Structure formats: C-alpha cells, structure tokens
Image: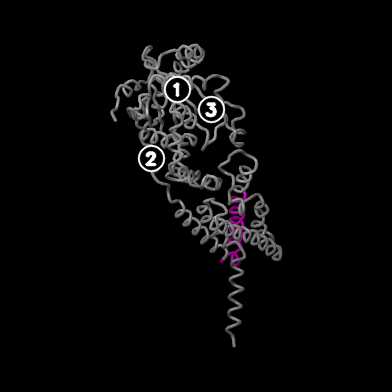
Amino acid sequence: MRKNHALSKKFTGKRSLSPYIFCISLFFILCPIYLAAQEKIPGEYLTVRIVEIGPGDEFFSWWGHLAVMVDNELTGESLCYDFGVFSFDDPHLVRNFLKGDLNYKVMVSTAQDELEWYIKNNRDITVYTLNLDSRQKEQIIYALNWNVLPENRNYVYKLFTDNCVTRVIYIIDKVLEGKFTEKYKNENGRFTLREHAERHLYRSAVMYVILNFIMGGEIDKPVSRFEEMFLPSEFTAAIVDFTYTDAKKNRQLLVSSIEKINTAVGRPVVLSKPPRGELYAFFAGMTGAVVLILLVMFEKKHRSVLIISGIVKSLITLYWALAGTVLFYAMFFSHHTYTYNNLNIIYANPLLFFGVPLGILSAFKKQEHKRIFYSRVLKGLWTYILFGCVFTIILRISGVNRSDNTLNLFLIIPSAAVLSFLEDLAVMVQKKLRLKQQP
C-alpha cells in the first residue's frame, strides 16, 4: 500500500503547554457549533483515518491506544475523536477503579494538538486511511458526533469488552453493514486473552505476576479474532486484511494507505508471542524452597536461625494472604469480570491471615511446647494450601475449570511442600519402612 508523507511533515512542531490548554479550552466551548456544521459537509470532502498509538509509560497505556481522525478538505482542519479519556481529578477514581466501574468518556480535539502530544510523549503513531464512499463517511461522522454529545460521551470502561477500540469497531461495523464482525467472529484468534495480556505485561515482572494471579478462567478459553480486538494492534491488523463489496458491487480494500507518523525511541517492543514466565516462576519457587529447607534444617540448632525462619514463614504467609484477599474482593465484590471463575481462590484467600502471626509465635515463644503448637498449626495451614494447589490441578485436568494458574502454582507449591506436614509424613513413612526391614 502506498504511504502518504504529507501527514508526517504536518505533525512535527512543538508547542508550549499554556497555548495548548487555551486552544483546547476554546475549542471545547465552540465544539457543539462546529460539529453541527461539520455534519452537513458532503462526505466527498472528508477523509476518515484510524490512528493507532503505541504503548506508553503508564500501566494503563501499555495496551496501546486508538482514535479516529477526520480531515475536512473544505476547511483544511482535522479533528481527532478519542474514546479513551479519563481524569485523575475524578474524586471517585480510586473507588471506581477498584470496583471495576472506571468512567471513561469520548472527547474531540484538533488532530494537530492530539498527535503532537503523543509525539512529545514518545509514542508510536500509525495512521490508516479508510477507503470509504461519501455516504459511508457521512455515517461515520454522524456516529462520531453523536458519541461526543454530553448525554452520550460517558461509558464504563472494560478492558476486554468495552474500550477505545471496541467503540470504534461498532461504528465501522455498522457502516459496513455488519460484515466486519461477521467475518472476524468466525475466525479463530491467535491466543487467549490471558496470553495477549501477558505479551503486554512482560515489561514488569511484578505486574506480570500480580495480574496472572487475579485473572481467572474467563479469559483462558479460545477466542475469535473479533474478541482479540480489545487491542489496537489486533484491530488495525484486521482492517488492513479486510475487503468489502461497495455500492457498485466491486471488491474494495478497507484501508487505502498506511503512514507511520512517529516512531518511539527506546521503548520495549511488545512480544509477538506470549512469554514463558512459568519457567522463571519454577526457578523462583525452587530457590525459595531451598532457602526454607536450609532454615528448617538449622533452626533447631541456632536460636537466631529460628527467629529468622519464623519471620520468613510469616512473611510468605502474609504475601499469599494479601494476594488472596485482593482476589477475594475482585471476584465477589467488583465488576472486574476477568477475575471471575479463578481457581487460585481455593488455596489463597483471606483465611491465610490466621497463619501470619504463627511463624513469629513459633519462634519467639519461650516455652517449647507452645512453639511446637504454633508450628504445627502453621504446618496444618500450609498443608491445606498444598492440597488446595493439587485440587486446582485436578480441576484443570478434568476440564471443570480453564484457569491457567500454572505460573502461580510453580511459585507456591515448592514452599508449601516445605512448610506443610509433607516432611513429617515422609519421616513417618521412612520409619515404618525401616521397621519392616528389621528381622
């Protein structure tokens, strides 16, 4: 496809922040009048483009972004319709985020200012010009302007089902008389939603582990290409491949040209395939188990080791108790649907908080019988955790639940094996075998 270099020359200037704020404020004041006038412009004078913006620094921008740009040939102006705007000044931002009811809105601004802002923030920008007739472009303009009306612009953001991409898809699909979704709903996707999320989360080991833990079986089922389009990159790949029949019964490419306006410098590249984090989790889990084994071996010989061992046991229990509490809230008290149907709740939940003080008590109590008591109770708790992990494996193998919790099992099972009654059981079995071998 041919590339139009006029755009890249247009969006290369820099502006100070104050004029930017003034211009945007003035634009929003005049916006309703301007949009009403624009709807009357014949489609032959309009060009509709999809703007794909690459990942940014903030966590919420790791998925990339999407907007629609409309060029007006009569006035020489361009507007950018952004379906992914939220405000940090919202007094209920944290509450809504935790609840899964984060409020997003659709906003319109000048394309010049919008794209320059992303260039300044070192984001990839690729523009796809749509090959549409006048009637189709007029329909898109009407739909875009309807979405930015005060009574229509707000919506509740959902990562996988309702975001800046899905809102644009439905506008494009309506213009194409449903053929777009019809095609891609019947094509198998490349990866599950979890695997797509992992491709974008790999840059942070902490976020990778946390989100892998709280994401449940709802996102581990096979999906269609349409469902993969919660990501801007998947949507733009689809529109490039798509063809449709126009009013004259001719086959047309949906995208007539592609242009790279800006290339980010020094940003991590999104993986083409899901990372194999399970291998790292296995080594981390085994390393932790070795450390615990050494502490358990020497805690009876050295008082200082006993204290360190007790603190470490309490900290490990605290970590999984906190993780389980977050998951418990997300599953049962939030609208984060991707956390539902999560097997990890079986072995990691708020009940583990009862075990947090036991490690310290088993180390600091002066009376030996009390130390033994608290130690055995903690072992009982970790035996429950170990059997819970085994139970989740059985549920997965049997097909009852699809939750891919392999990474978390590799992290917790080695420690659970050391901290549970498994060692005591092994010693007991060994003694019985020795007794049988005696004449």
Does 275 appear above or below 230?
A: below
Query: What is the distance, in whole Å, between disc 1 and disc 3 at their CAs?
Result: 23 Å
Does 150 appear above or below 269?
A: above
The answer to whether mark 2 and mark 1 are in CB contact below 8 A is no
Q: Pointer 2: what residue? A: 269
Q: Which residue is drawn at 30% across and 21% down?
A: 6
Q: Main secondary structure of the magenta part?
A: helix
Q: Pointer 1: what residue? A: 140
Residue 352 position in % (x across, y down): 65, 53
Residue with the most extreme bottom position = 439
Q: Under tag 2, what secondary structure?
A: loop
Q: What is the image's colouring?
A: one colour
Whichever of labels 2 and 1 marks the residue nearer the N terminus, that label is 1
Residue type at mark 3 is Phe
Q: Under tag 1, what secondary structure?
A: helix
Residue 106 position in % (x across, y down): 51, 24
User: Per the image, is 80 magenta?
Assistant: no
Query: What is the distance, in whole Å, between disc 2 and disc 3 at their CAs?
Result: 26 Å
Residue type at mark 1 is Ile
Q: Residue at x 50, y 53 (%)?
A: 407
